[in-house]
C-alpha cells in the first residue's frame, strides 16, 4: 500500500478539517503500529536470548541494563549498516514501514535499557509488561478500525484458516490450564480445552476482520503477559504433571510464551498497518515468515555456537602451524581476493565508495593476515594464544595448559606445498586462454615442441617397465645405471625448458610475445618432463644428487623461480602498453608464467613426499613432517599417554565413507536422471520411479541400516565393514541425487536442446555439452546437501559399521588394494574391516557416556560439524562457479 493510500485511510466527521487532520492522525496511527511491531521484534529477540541463557530471566538493575545496552549496540550496528548500504544504493530501503520498524527497534531497546537502570525490575517481569503493551496496542488498533476512527478495508471475516489456527492455540492453552486445575486424569480438562478452542475460533471467524484479527491475539498475548507479570509463571516455577514423563520450568516456558506473543502481536499489528484485506494478510504473512526464518537462523547459529563453545577448546589443543605454511595456505585466498578486487562490484547505481569498499575489503583482510604472518616469519617471533582444556584421568577431570601457536620456522610440508601448488596451477590454467598463432616459431622451436612429448613418453615407458619387472630386470641393475642417468637427464632437460620463457623474452625483438611459442613449450614441456622424471625416479628408486642436495627438487624450485620472474617481467611490460590486443596477449603470457611457477612448486613438494627426504634451499625447508600439527585430527588415540591423543582414525573413516557413498550414488543418480528426463517416455514407468524415489528419500535412516545389516553384511564377509557403510550411505544419498538432478535437468529450457539440434548435434552431444553443464549448479547443490546429511548419520553406521571407539590405527584403503589371480582379481581387506567414524564416536562418548571424556566427545562433534559445514561451503562455491560460468557464456 502506498504512503498516499495510507494517509487517506482516516475519516473524521468534519470534511473541512479532514485535510489538516489526516496526515497527523495517519502518522500517529502508523507510527504506533510500527512501534508495536518493533516491540514484538525486540521481545522476540529477548525471548530467544533468555531461552539459551545469554540473558537471565532473573537479571535486573545494572546487569539487565548492560545486557540491553549490548543488544542496543547490536541493533545500532545492524540497522546502521543497512542504513549506510541503503544510502549507497547497495541495498535500497524505500519502504516507510521498514524504516519505521527499524526506528522503533532502536527507540524500544533504548527505552528498555533506561527502564532497567532506573527501576529494579527483572527481565521476566519486563517481558510480561511488554506483552501487555503489545496486546493493548493491537486491541486499540482493531477497535479504531471497527469504530471508523481510521479508514481501513477489512473483509467480512478473518478467515477459516485464522480461526482454525487460533482454535488450535486455544485448545493447547485451555488444555494446559484445565490439566493444571483439575488434573489430566479427569476428563474435565478436555472440556476446558474444547471451550477455549471454540471460543477463540468463534471470535476469530464471526466478527469483521479488524476485530477477528486483533481481539484473539490480544486476548492470548494479554493473558500470557499478565501471567508472566504477576509471576504466576516465573523463574522458579516448575510443573511436573503426574500423567506424563518430564516437566516444565519457567526458564523454558516464559521465553516460549514471549516468542509466541511476539509473533502473534506482530502479525496482528502488521495486518492493521496495511489496512487489513489482501494487503494486510500479505504483510502479516510476510512478517510471520520473516520472524520464523529468523528463528530458524537463530536455532542454527545457536547449535553451531553451542557445539563450538563446548568443543573448540579441546579440539584446538596443541594446534601449531608455521608462519610459512600458513602463508602457503593463505595463497589461494589471496588469489581469489585479487581476482574479486579486479571485477566490478554491484551495479552502476551503487555509490562509488560502496563499490570500492566491497571490491577491496576481502583483499584488505587477507592482506592484513598475510602481513602478520610475514612479520612473524621475518622477525622470528611466534604468535601464541594460551588457554586450558580438560581431560579425563581415572574418571576425574584434569585441567591441562595448551596454546594455539604460529611458529616462525621457515619450513613447509611437502603435501601442503604440493596440494596448494596443484590447486593454484589448475586455477591459473583455467584462466589461461591461448598463445597459439602468436609470435614467431623458429625451426628450433618446432623441433623442441616435437621432442618433448617423445622424451616424456620414453621416461614413462621406462617407469612402467620398472613397475612391472622391478628395478633389476634379468638381473641387470638398470635402475641404478640407466634409470639414474635418465632421471638426471630429464631433470637437466626440464631445467633448460623452465628457463626457456626468460630466453624468449631476451630473444624477442618485436616485444615480449614475439617468441611466445618458445615460452609455451618451455612452461608446459618443462612441467611434463619433470613430472615424468619424478615418476621414473619413484619407480626406479634412483635419486641423483649433488652433494647432500637432490637434483629434482632443486630443478623444480629453479623452474618455479624462472616462471615467476617471467610472469613479473611480462606484468611490468604490460603496464606500459595501452593497446587492448597487446595487453590481452601479455596478460595471457603472465598467466602462463603463473601456471609454471605454481606447477613447479607443486612438483617440488611431490618429490619430497615421494622420496621421503627433506630439501633445503635458501634457508627454507620442504619436509614430509611439515610445521602443521593438530593433535585432535592428526593423531590416533593414545590409551596410556599423558594426553589422550586424537581422532584421526575416525576422521579418515568418515572421509572414506563419504567418498565411497558419493562414488556410488552420484554416477547412478545423475545417469538415472538423464535417462528419465531425456530418453524415457513420460508415463506410468516414470511416475512409479518418481514415487519410489520420493519414498526412499523419506525412509528413516535406521531402515537403511537394518537393510544393510540383513542384506549387505552377510554378503560382505559376515561382519561390519567399511564397504557396508559406504553402500548404505550411498543408498541413502541416491534418491536425493536423483531427485535434484532430475529437477535441474527439467529446468533447462527446451530452446537449448532445439538450438543444439539445429546445429547438427546428436542427442548425446546435446546432453553432454548443453544440458548437463546448464543443470550442473542444481546437481551439485543436491549432491552436497545429501553428502552433508549422510556424513552425520549415526543409526545406520552403528548397524553396519560398528561402533569402533578411540581407534589407534586408521584404515589404509589405498594401500589395501591387492591383485590376485582369481575373480574378482582385485581385493582390499581394509574395505572389509570395521572402522571408526565421527558420528558413532560422538554418539558413544556423549549420548552413551562411554569411552572417553565429555570434552573429547564435544570436540569430536565440533570436528564433525566443521566437516559438514565444509561440504556445504564447497557446494555453495561450486554452484556459484557454475552459475557464473553459465551466465558468462
Image (spheres, rainbow, N blue to C red):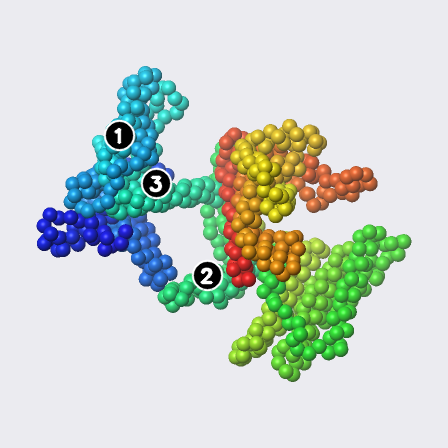
Percent x, y of residue 736? 55, 41
Percent x, y of residue 482? 83, 62
Residue hosting label 2: 362
- Camera-nearest label, 3 or 1: 1
Please report whichever mark, 3 or 2, sits nearer to the chain's N-terminal start: 3
- Camera-nearest label, 1 or 2: 1
Percent x, y of residue 138? 22, 40
Q: Residue at x 76, y 70 (%)?
A: 450
Please rate how many residues cluster around mark 1, counting C-alpha atoms within 10 Å: few if below 14, some from 14 to 19, many from 20: some
Helix, strand or loop at disc 1? helix
Kindly indicate the quadrant of the structure image that contains residue 811: top right
Gap in angstroms between the C-alphas marked 3 and 1:
32 Å
Q: Residue at x 51, y 64 (%)?
A: 339
Residue hosting label 1: 202
Of residues 813 and 823, which is closer to you in this image?
823
Please rate how many residues cluster around mark 3, counting C-alpha atoms within 10 Å: few if below 14, some from 14 to 19, many from 20: many
Gap in angstroms between the C-alphas marked 3 and 2:
32 Å
Please rate how many residues cluster around mark 2, counting C-alpha atoms within 10 Å: few if below 14, some from 14 to 19, many from 20: some
Res. 733 in view: no
Residue hosting label 3: 48
- Residue at the bottom extreme of this rendering: 509
Amino acid at each position: 500500500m502506498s504512503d498516499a493510500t495510507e494517509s487517506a485511510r482516516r475519516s473524521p466527521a468534519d470534511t473541512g478539517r479532514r485535510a489538516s487532520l489526516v496526515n497527523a492522525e495517519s502518522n500517529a496511527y502508523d507510527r504506533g503500529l510500527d512501534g508495536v511491531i518493533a516491540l514484538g521484534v525486540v521481545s522476540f529477540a529477548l525471548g530467544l536470548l533468555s531461552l539459551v541463557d545469554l540473558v537471565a530471566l532473573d537479571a535486573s538493575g545494572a546487569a539487565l541494563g548492560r545486557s540491553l545496552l549490548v543488544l542496543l549496540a547490536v541493533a545500532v550496528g545492524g540497522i546502521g549498516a543497512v542504513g549506510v548500504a541503503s544510502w549507497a544504493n547497495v541495498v535500497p530501503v524505500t519502504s516507510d514501514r521498514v524504516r519505521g520498524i527499524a526506528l522503533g527497534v532502536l527507540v524500544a531497546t533504548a527505552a528498555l535499557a533506561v527502564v532497567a537502570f532506573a527501576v529494579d525490575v527483572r527481565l521476566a517481569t519486563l517481558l510480561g509488561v511488554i506483552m501487555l503493551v503489545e496486546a493493548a496496542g493491537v486491541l486499540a488498533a482493531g477497535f479504531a478500525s471497527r469504530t471508523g476512527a481510521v479508514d481501513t478495508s477489512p473483509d467480512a471475516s478473518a478467515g477459516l484458516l485464522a480461526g482454525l489456527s487460533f482454535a488450535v492455540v486455544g485448545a493447547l492453552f485451555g488444555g494446559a490450564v484445565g490439566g493444571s486445575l483439575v488434573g489430566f486424569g479427569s476428563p474435565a480438562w478436555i472440556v476446558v480445552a474444547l471451550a477455549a478452542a471454540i471460543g477463540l475460533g468463534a471470535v476469530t471467524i464471526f466478527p469483521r476482520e479488524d476485530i477477528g484479527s486483533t481481539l484473539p491475539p490480544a486476548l492470548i498475548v494479554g493473558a500470557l503477559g499478565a501471567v508472566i507479570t504477576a509471576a504466576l509463571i516465573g523463574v522458579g516455577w516448575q510443573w511436573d504433571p503426574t500423567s506424563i514423563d518430564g516437566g516444565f520450568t519457567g526458564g523454558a516456558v516464559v521465553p516460549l510464551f514471549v516468542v509466541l506473543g511476539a509473533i502473534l502481536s506482530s502479525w496482528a499489528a502488521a495486518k492493521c498497518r496495511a489496512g487489513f484485506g489482501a494487503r494486510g494478510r500479505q504483510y502479516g504473512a510476510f512478517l510471520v515468515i520473516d520472524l520464523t526464518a529468523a528463528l530458524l537462523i537463530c536455532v542454527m547459529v545457536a547449535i553451531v555456537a553451542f557445539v563450538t563453545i563446548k568443543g573448540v577448546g579441546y579440539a584446538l589443543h596443541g594446534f601449531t602451524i608455521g608462519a610459512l605454511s600458513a602463508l602457503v595456505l593463505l595463497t589461494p585466498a589471496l588469489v581469489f581476493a585479487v581476482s574479486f578486487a579486479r571485477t566490478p562490484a554491484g551495479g552502476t547505481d551503487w555509490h562509488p565508495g560502496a563499490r570500492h569498499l566491497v571490491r577491496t575489503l576481502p583483499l584488505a583482510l587477507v592482506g592484513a593476515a598475510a602481513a602478520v604472518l610475514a612479520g612473524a616469519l621475518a622477525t622470528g617471533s611466534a604468535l601464541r594464544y594460551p588457554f586450558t582444556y580438560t581431560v579425563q584421568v581415572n574418571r576425574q577431570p584434569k585441567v591441562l595448559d595448551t596454546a594455539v601457536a604460529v611458529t616462525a620456522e621457515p619450513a613447509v610440508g611437502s603435501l601442503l606445498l604440493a596440494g596448494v601448488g596443484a590447486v593454484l596451477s589448475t586455477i591459473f590454467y583455467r584462466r589461461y586462454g591461448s598463445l597459439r598463432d602468436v609470435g614467431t616459431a623458429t625451426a628450433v622451436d618446432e623441433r623442441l615442441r616435437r621432442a618433448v612429448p617423445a622424451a616424456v613418453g620414453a621416461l614413462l615407458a621406462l617407469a612402467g617397465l620398472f613397475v612391472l619387472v622391478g628395478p633389476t630386470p634379468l638381473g641387470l641393475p638398470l635402475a641404478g645405471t640407466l634409470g639414474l642417468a635418465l632421471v638426471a637427464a630429464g631433470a637437466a632437460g626440464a631445467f633448460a625448458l623452465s628457463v626457456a620463457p626468460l630466453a624468449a623474452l631476451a630473444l624477442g625483438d618485436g616485444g615480449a610475445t614475439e617468441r611466445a611459442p618458445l615460452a609455451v613449450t618451455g612452461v608446459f614441456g618443462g612441467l611434463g618432463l619433470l613430472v615424468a622424471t619424478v615418476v621414473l625416479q619413484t619407480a626406479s628408486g634412483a635419486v641423483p644428487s649433488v652433494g647432500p642436495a637432490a637434483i629434482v627438487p632443486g630443478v623444480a624450485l629453479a623452474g618455479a623461480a624462472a616462471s615467476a620472474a617471467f610472469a613479473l617481467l611480462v606484468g611490468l611490460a604490460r603496464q606500459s602498453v595501452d593497446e587492448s590486443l597487446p595487453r590481452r596477449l601479455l596478460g595471457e603470457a603472465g598467466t602462463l608464467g603463473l601456471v609454471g611457477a605454481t606447477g613447479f612448486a607443486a612438483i617440488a613438494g611431490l618429490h619430497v613426499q615421494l622420496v621421503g627426504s627433506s630439501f633445503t634451499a635458501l634457508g627454507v625447508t620442504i619436509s614430509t613432517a611439515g610445521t602443521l600439527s593438530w593433535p585432535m585430527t592428526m593423531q590416533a588415540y593414545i590409551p596410556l599417554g599423558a594426553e589422550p591423543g586424537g581422532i584421526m582414525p575416525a576422521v579418515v573413516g568418515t572421509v572414506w565413507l563419504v567418498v565411497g557413498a558419493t562414488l556410488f550414488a552420484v554416477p547412478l543418480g545423475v545417469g538415472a536422471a538423464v535417462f528419465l528426463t531425456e530418453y524415457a517416455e513420460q508415463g506410468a514407468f516414470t511416475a512409479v520411479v518418481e514415487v519410489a524415489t520420493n519414498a526412499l528419500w523419506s525412509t528413516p535412516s535406521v531402515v537403511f541400516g537394518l537393510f544393510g545389516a540383513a542384506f549387505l553384511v552377510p554378503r560382505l564377509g559376515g561382519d561390519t565393514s567399511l564397504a557396508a557403510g559406504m553402500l548404505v550411505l550411498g543408498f541413502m544419498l541416491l534418491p536425493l541425487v536423483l531427485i535434484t538432478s532430475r529437477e535441474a535437468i527439467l529446468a533447462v529450457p527446451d530452446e537449448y536442446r532445439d538450438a543444439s539440434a539445429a546445429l547438427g548435434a546428436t542427442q548425446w552431444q546435446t546432453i553432454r555439452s548443453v544440458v548437463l553443464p546448464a543443470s550442473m549448479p542444481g546437481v551439485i547443490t543436491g549432491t552436497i546437501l545429501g553428502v552433508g546429511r549422510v556424513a552425520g548419520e549415526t543409526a545406520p553406521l552403528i548397524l553396519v559399521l560398528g561402533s569402533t571407539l578411540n581407534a589407534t590405527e586408521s584404515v589404509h584403503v589405498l594401500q589395501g588394494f591387492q591383485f590376485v589371480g582369481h575373480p574378482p582379481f582385485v581385493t582390499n581387506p581394509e574395505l572389509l574391516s570395521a572402522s571408526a567414524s565421527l558420528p558413532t564416536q560422538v554418539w558413544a562418548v556423549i549420548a552413551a557416556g562411554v569411552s572417553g571424556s565429555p570434552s573429547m566427545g564435544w570436540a569430536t562433534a565440533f570436528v564433525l560439524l566443521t566437516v559438514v559445514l565444509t561440504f556445504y561451503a564447497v557446494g555453495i562455491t561450486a554452484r556459484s562457479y557454475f552459475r557464473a560460468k553459465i551466465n558468462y557464456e
